[in-house]
Amino acid sequence: MAETTGASILALSARIWQLMSGQDVDRLEQLIDDDAVFVHMGATFTKEQELEVIRRGQIHYRDIHVSDTSLRRLGATAIVLTTMEMTAVVDGNEVTNPFVTTSVFIENDDHWRLGALAFTRLLTR
């Protein structure tokens, strides 16, 4: 059962990246906890702020190439580390960066939702 839960959390993480890349804010909203936080390089957003940035196209996570993903379960909390190279359009400028993202998922009422997402830009590869 733990493997199934782990696999479902990793699938949820992948689904969130897919929806972010596709700018599908309506479906994305359902997978994020209302109190979630998003930590970017130089900015911290609430759920509403992050979704609005995606909705307006201020950030478009265009191409995401995942090279590694790992999962740690801590009771009703799961931490997913994802190593990726991401091409995004930020305020009209295309940028490509290597990142490790930390996604924190929380289980509430038998549903897993994203509670936090932090981007850490890798300095070297």
Image (cartoon, rainbow, N blue to C red):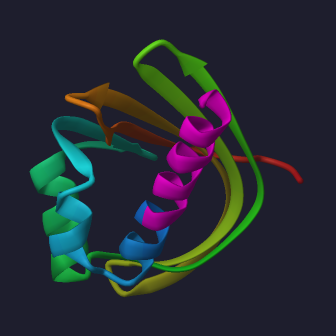
Foreground residue among 35 and 5: 5
In the depicted structure, whether residue 20 falls above or below residue 112 = below
Q: Position of residue 76 (x, y in %)?
A: 40, 18
Q: Give me the residue at 60% from left, 38% from top.
A: 6
Foreground residue among 89 and 75: 75
In the depicted structure, whether residue 113 falls above or below residue 91 = above
Foreground residue among 117 and 92: 117
Foreground residue among 82 and 122: 82
Q: Which residues are magenta?
A: 1-15
Q: Give me the residue at 41% from left, 62% from top.
A: 16
In the depicted structure, whether residue 46 falls above or below residue 76 = below
In the depicted structure, whether residue 15 falls above or below residue 35 = below
Q: Position of residue 34 (x, y in %)?
A: 12, 40
Location of the N terminus by quadrant is top right
Side of 78 relative to 20 (left or right): right
Q: Give me the residue at 47% from left, 74% from top.
A: 18
Q: Give me the residue at 35% from left, 28% from top.
A: 106
Number of numbered discs overlaid on the protein picture: 0
Q: Position of residue 14 (x, y in %)?
A: 54, 62
Q: Position of residue 17 (x, y in %)?
A: 48, 66
